[in-house]
Amino acid sequence: MRGLYRLYNISVDVFWAMLLFVLPITSMPAVRDLLHINTIASPSVLFLGILAVVWLLPYLIYKGELPVEALPLVGFLVVCLLSLVLSGFINIPTFKFAGIIRPSLSAFVTLLVGIGYLFLTFSRVTTGNAFQRTIFWIYVGGLLMIVWSLMQSGAWFIFKRYPDWMRDFQDLLSLGPLYRQRATGFALEPSWLAHMLNMLYLPMWLSAAVTGYSIFGFRLFKRITVEMGLLILGVLTLVLTFSRVGWFTFFCMVALLVIKVNIRLIRWIRMRFKIRANLTAISTVGITLILVLIYLAIAVGAAYGMSRVDPRMADLFTPQFWQLNNLNRYANALQFGERVVYWQAGWDVFNKFPLFGVGLGNSGRWFVDTIPPYGMNLIEVRQLLFRAPDLPNSKNLWVRLLAETGIVGFAFYTAWLFSVLKRAVTLNRINSRVLKMTGYWGIFIITGLFFEGFSIDSFAMPYFWISAGLVLASGRYVSDVDN
């Protein structure tokens, strides 16, 4: 009996390690064919299903602990069910050959998958050693993702093409192609690679670098950790995705640290130059304005640099661009006009059904009527509405929440995010290196999700859920492995 129990624990550990290791693979053809799903076909879903049966369910049956911060999330789940029930009482437009039940069921299952990642992560990480083992396997998978991404970019910049063997290998692991100039990693597209970097790997490595935390005993010159090296490689990979939302998201994470440094700098300047008490407020405002101007200049310079290397932003600093005088035209000139059109369509759905929305997966059924007139000038929009077989979506998490779950669902979901943020701030104030690290991690992912939500609207992407699970789990123990 003891041997069987030991075998069970080893098997669960192996499945958990494999789930974490394959996280960079987002859309594997073999998984798509096995599960008969369209896009998000990550092999981690297979391991999630196995672990949900052999580990998570027994854990819950034996009254295993779950994060109290997840209570608003459970409320959100209830609201989603209620909105689906209420959608049966409204006149839902037909859309091509899309059925009524399957899209809603699929959308609800993706939400359950995301919550499954959260609860599984929380249940598996109960000690400092378990935390270290977990992020070790995340490191390994992330490092391989980075190496493959750098190989892609190297091949393109050296040969201006991808070798056939590289395309064949990519086809084996991803439904998406290799993009011109842009790194994709093992993901479906470059923006998905940027999303996983910003929701898991970069916040983890950035918070470790800031606090000096490391799961390894090795340090170069007693200060430089492995995580610092991984952070540099991860940032380089993010740059090579040429994902503008991805760049801006990480910039805002770093900006939080800059603001904290600036507060200390202002205090140091006041003390260093012995500014009188009655001038403290004036000096603080003055120094702050100077710093803001400096950072605005840096931001403009960065935007100019991006316009020189990214063809989508080539017109940003031309007189013609600033004469467009229309939000849709500005967006189209920067080559994200289609997304703004989808946002507007989803917002109009919310305006029609503001309280509980139209139910998960249903908002696209109204898009034929809610797409703004300008949208019909865009080829992608016409293709999606009249030729593509699938229901369109808002491609914006926040608009989707409002359109499909209404203001009630939106309130519960944002309350869930606020509870994670509050927990992260609390952890960050504890005198423990690992807890400070996870505190920063939580703050970064909430900041990141705010901006990434304008690009990706799926609940099934595991990266935020796993990060949140690790942050919430770290509050259950006082680590004895503060490296």
Image: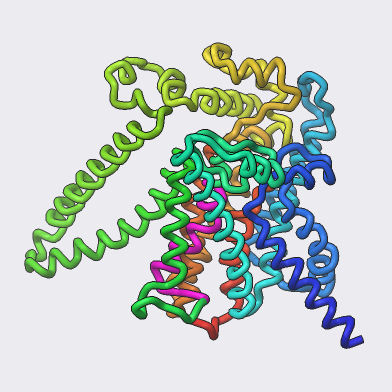
Q: Can residue 387 be seen in the rendering of this structure?
A: yes
- The part of the image, by quadrant, that contains residue 18 is bottom right
> Which residues are drawn in magenta?
194-215
| Relative to 218, 138 lies left or right | right
Residue 205 is one of the magenta-drawn residues: yes
Vertical comparison of 5 with 201: above or below: below
Question: Residue at the location (72% across, 24% down)?
Answer: 365
Question: Residue at the location (40% across, 22% down)?
Answer: 330
| Coloration mode | rainbow
Q: Could you tell me residue 227's position as x and y percent?
A: 46, 67
| Relative to 437, 286 lies left or right | left
Question: Residue at the location (71% across, 49% down)?
Answer: 42
Q: Quadrant of the N terminus?
A: bottom right
Vertical comparison of 60 with 97: above or below: below
Q: Main secondary structure of the magenta part?
A: helix
| Relative to 116, 320 lies left or right | left
Residue 237 is one of the magenta-drawn residues: no
Comparing 257 with 187, the one in front is: 187
Vertical comparison of 271 with 49: above or below: below
Comparing 152 with 309, the one in front is: 152
Q: Could you tell me residue 276's position as x and y percent?
A: 7, 65
Comparing 167 with 310, the one in front is: 167
Question: Residue at the location (10% across, 69% down)?
Answer: 272
- Outermost residue toward the right in this view: 1
Q: Could you tell me residue 198's position as x and y percent?
A: 51, 52
Q: Can residue 79 be seen in the rendering of this structure?
A: no
Q: Could you tell me residue 92's position as x and y percent?
A: 77, 23
Vertical comparison of 469 with 415: above or below: below
**Numbered disc total:** 0
